[in-house]
Image (spheres, helix red, strand yellow):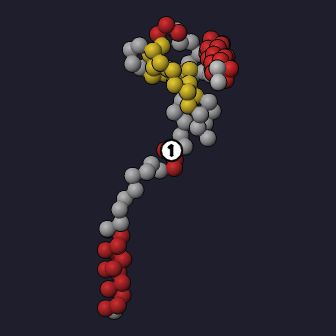
Amino acid sequence: MDAKLLALMALLTVATHTPTSKAKPISLVERCWCRSTLNTVPQRSIKELKFLHTPNCPFQVIAKLKNNREVCINPATKWLQQYLKNAINKVKKSKRRNGQNM
């Protein structure tokens, strides 16, 4: 009987002194930031764009507006597609120029 009590006390001591993890549960980590998207956001009201690509979520575009509100924009929006195409072309041109100067 004393051995069982001693084992129980040891188990309780270990369980109460185990450090807790600060990591988020998997269910929270794998959630997509954008659950719904907007198709119409005036470009002039956008202060900043963020692009998120996470393993279990589709490509996400988050716009921070001038009033500091954040909204998700549909990545298929026509003006956003053009914006991304222009940005990619600009990066390609920059790389070509830097490669020729070496």
Point out the image quarter for the C terminus: top right
Measuring 48% from the left and 13% from the top, which residue is drawn there?
Answer: 46
Quadrant of the rendered image containing residue 4: bottom left
Residue 70, placed above or below residue 78: below
Q: In this view, does 81 lie to the left or right of 41?
A: right
Q: Observer-nearest residue: 4 or 94? A: 94
Q: Which residue bears the numbered disc 1?
A: 29
Disc 1, SS = helix
Q: Where is residue 100 in the image (x, y as percent from the top left)?
A: 68, 20
Q: How many marks?
A: 1
Query: Tag 1: residue type?
Result: Val
Measuring 55% from the left and 36% from the top, which residue is drawn there?
Answer: 32
Q: Position of residue 24 (x, y in %)?
A: 45, 48
Question: Is there any visible trace of residue 88 in the rendered image?
Answer: no
Q: Observer-nearest residue: 67 or 88? A: 88
Measuring 39% from the left and 52% from the top, which residue is drawn there?
Answer: 22
